[in-house]
Image (cartoon, rainbow, N blue to C red):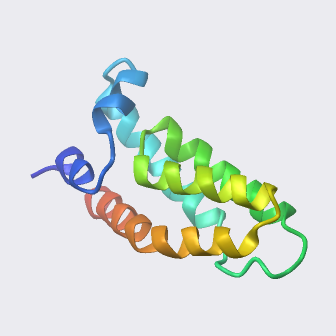
């Protein structure tokens, strides 16, 4: 199997992402690298008890946008929910959603990295 097939196995809607990019597979792969950079620079801690959720909202919104553009569906859906919960001042519920997506997110990241090395 290749990168796209492996990502599909993890719930990524590669076909939709490619459609957004006019079918340009090389561009999609390059943007997957941008997704990795976003994930590296926007660490969202599962502890939202700091009181000021502004930074957490900004980071989760950035991840939501990047994953949505590439149709990394599991990550996009989770971070959409996390952003909404944080904006509604429900950090405990957001933390639960984050903790559920982290293992899936890590598998997707590792999959992308395994083909980019």
Q: Where is residue 8 in the image (x, y as percent from the top left)?
A: 24, 48
Relative side of 68 to 60, left or right:
left
- Front-most of residues 33 and 44: 44
Task: Say if residue 44 shows up in the picture.
Answer: no
- Front-most of residues 49 and 111: 49
Relative side of 64 to 76, left or right:
right
What residue is shown at x 28% (from left), y 57% (from top)? Answer: 10
The correct choice, above or below, for 17 with respect to 50 in the image is above
What residue is shown at x 21% (from left), y 54% (from top)? Answer: 9
Task: Say if residue 108 shows up in the picture.
Answer: yes
The correct choice, above or below, for 70 with respect to 102 in the image is above
The correct choice, above or below, for 3 with respect to 69 in the image is below
Relative side of 14 to 97, left or right:
left
Res. 15 image quadrant:
top left
Relative side of 94 to 27, left or right:
right
Q: Where is residue 38 in the image (x, y as percent from the top left)?
A: 59, 55
Q: Position of residue 114 (x, y in %)?
A: 27, 64
What residue is shown at x 29% (from left), y 62% (from top)? Answer: 111
What residue is shown at x 64% (from left), y 59% (from top)? Answer: 82
The correct choice, above or below, for 48 with respect to 26 in the image is below
Q: Which residue reaches farthest right?
A: 52
Location of the C terminus (image quadrant): bottom left
Res. 79 image quadrant:
bottom right
Q: Position of residue 16 (x, y in %)?
A: 35, 30
């Amino acid at each position: 199997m290749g990168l796209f097939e492996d990502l599909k196995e993890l719930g990524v809607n590669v076909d939709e992402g490619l459609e957004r990019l006019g079918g340009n597979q090389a561009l999609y792969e390059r943007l997957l690298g941008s997704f990795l950079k976003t994930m590296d620079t926007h660490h969202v801690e599962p502890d939202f008890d700091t009181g000021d959720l502004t930074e957490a909202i900004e980071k989760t919104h950035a991840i939501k946008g990047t994953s949505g553009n590439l149709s990394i569906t599991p990550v996009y859906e989770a971070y959409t929910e996390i952003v909404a919960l944080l904006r509604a001042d429900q950090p405990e519920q957001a933390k639960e959603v984050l903790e559920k997506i982290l293992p899936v997110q890590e598998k997707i990241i590792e999959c992308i990295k395994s083909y980019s090395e």
